[in-house]
Amino acid sequence: MVKVVVNGIGTIGKRVAEAVRKQEDMQLYGIADVSPSGQLKDELSEEGGLHGTPLYASNQDGLENLSDAGMHVEGLLEEEVDEIDVVVDCTPSGVDQMNKENLYEPNNIKAIFEGGADSEIAPVSFNADANYDEARGEDFVRVVSCNTTSLSRTMDAVESSFEIEKATANLVRRGGDIPQDSRGPINSTIPVTEVPSHHGPDVQEVMPDLDIKTLAVKVPTTYGHVHMVTAELESNPSEEDVKAAFREQPRVEVLSAGEGYDSTAKIHEKMRDLGRKRSDMQEAAVWEETITVEDGTLYWIHMVHQEAIVVPENIDAIRAMFETEDQETSIEMTNDSMGIE
Amino acid sequence: MVKVVVNGIGTIGKRVAEAVRKQEDMQLYGIADVSPSGQLKDELSEEGGLHGTPLYASNQDGLENLSDAGMHVEGLLEEEVDEIDVVVDCTPSGVDQMNKENLYEPNNIKAIFEGGADSEIAPVSFNADANYDEARGEDFVRVVSCNTTSLSRTMDAVESSFEIEKATANLVRRGGDIPQDSRGPINSTIPVTEVPSHHGPDVQEVMPDLDIKTLAVKVPTTYGHVHMVTAELESNPSEEDVKAAFREQPRVEVLSAGEGYDSTAKIHEKMRDLGRKRSDMQEAAVWEETITVEDGTLYWIHMVHQEAIVVPENIDAIRAMFETEDQETSIEMTNDSMGIE
């Protein structure tokens, strides 16, 4: 049993902690935070997904904040270092780097960082499909962001079957998550003026040989980024070949607009109908009708649920770092535990 | 003086009719419609942009509808055919084709159609910058849609200076215009599942030798489409070269996000501040910071005000069809009359 702590119970942290609890080969030793947020209280309440999980404070101030708010705190996270195998660090960018230097490195604890962290924070930027084996035995691994994860999954499916000469992905990003109602834009489209946007280079952290450029804009939606992708291939597959390659990818869903899934909102509704907690979608969803090949150039459009897609990758990263399972087995175990088909 | 009638006073028609009134070499002989909309009444009211313009009915039913609503109607449009040089037909798709067959062709009246019409409706699909001379002397011309216009302008600027080998444009389309508040999407992003979307082939109606593909999605905004463009060039210009080429294009504005124009909404506000009627923007706006060249591949992002961009093209199309002015002069006259710098 790998003993796991999730540090930082926010959008990603709460989902990863819940996912760790579902793994037979892992123990959620505890969670850690610094602030008594409503979210943290809800998670630990009787109806919450983390009910009964020991809560630690990430630092001295946090201990006071949490205690003052009447929450039961076991103590400081740093006092538990001998008991912990790995920390999944879901703290804000910058804090993760400090945690690495002050807590994980000095105490020889393995740690996983998220896509908001600088890629320098770990020797491996990780995607379960594209480079699982590179994380084997590593002490520090960074799970890439939601956009990069969806690109890595789909690009890996295409690259391994048809070889990509050059790719461009144009990202249409949601303005904020559902609870982030103070974020924009309102009734506006905002270009990311940096070209390429950081997503392309981030995919190259996972797939260094992939020639990919990305452009991005931000729009007023709350559930799902959308990517319009163009990939020049070395081969000239049929559209059915490409659909088959995507379908074989264990975390890519091919959905048909014609069957009613013709927008991000309709796919959101599908997840609600399926009873997925928080209507999360851990898969990348490719719209079947958009898969088009012309003269060896492949086009498609896919969506990414920004809050959920990286969660299974965090679980697989743990198994890779402890070398307990091979890639295929880990992905299957994680998928089974989370209802990903 | 070319005598012009605008048939169909909607989003485009009202703007074109107002623009015709501003031209020294054109007379707005009248406008025509079939339904007593609030929009039509407003345009003809004392404060309206078409105050004093003779109103004709496009058909017998229209004559009754307009008269019943108490509007002053001069009579049927078909009774004026001997007086009219050209009709700018801004009626809905399908109606324009009937008008061509039943009214314009039998009476030898020249006519301009809009981008919603099938490209078969006229021998020339028109953009003032890209192919002005092809409309010279023609009886029927189709002014392409807003998206196609912006792509034709920018592509023409790049093509004529640097030669395009292959281009991809990914369109992020507004859900509806400001008054179209019953349209969607709400909080969703909808892929156009046809790949390429119709915009690429439509650009090729204007620039037949251009290898261009387009993908598109629709988002919850009301002012402005946004395009993310990739163009592989035959040459390898500097970014400054490209900026200069865009700046020389008489209907492309290069705007800097760093100076505050960092979204469609901010550019909308700029048009409001400039006192442009309806906050219209007839120019395509390229975000300066996004203009990027890497290994002979050019990237940029631009916006298009969907309601206004085609209006100056309609004016230039008239001059081309009557061969009264050359391209450069017509564009300059139109721009001067409309405050386009």
Image (tube, coloured by chain):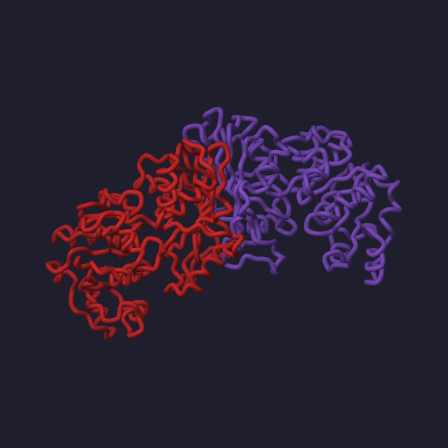
Chain colours: A purple, B red
Q: Nearer the viewer, residue B8 or A195?
A: A195
Q: Nearer the viewer, residue A52 or A86?
A: A86
Residue A253 at x, y percent in the picture: 56, 39
Asked if residue A243 shows in the view, the reply is no
Q: Is residue A296 left or right of residue A52?
A: left
Residue appearing at x 40%, y 55% in the figure: B305
Q: Nearer the viewer, residue A23 or A41?
A: A41
Asked if residue A153 shows in the view, the reply is yes
Residue B238 at x, y percent in the picture: 47, 37
In the rendered image of this protein, does residue A258 appear above or below residue B19?
above
Residue appearing at x 53%, y 59% in the figure: A186
Residue A92 at x, y percent in the picture: 71, 49
Q: Residue lying at the far left in this picture: please name it.
A: B82
Q: Residue lying at the far top in this picture: please name it.
A: A235
In the rendered image of this protein, does residue B127 appear above or below residue B181?
above
Residue appearing at x 86%, y 50% in the figure: A76
Q: Quadrant of the N terminus of chain B?
A: bottom left
Residue appearing at x 39%, y 57% in the figure: B281
Q: Quadrant of the C terminus of chain B?
A: bottom left
Q: How many marks?
A: 0
In the rendered image of this protein, does residue B42 appear above or below residue A298?
below
Residue A239 at x, y percent in the picture: 45, 31
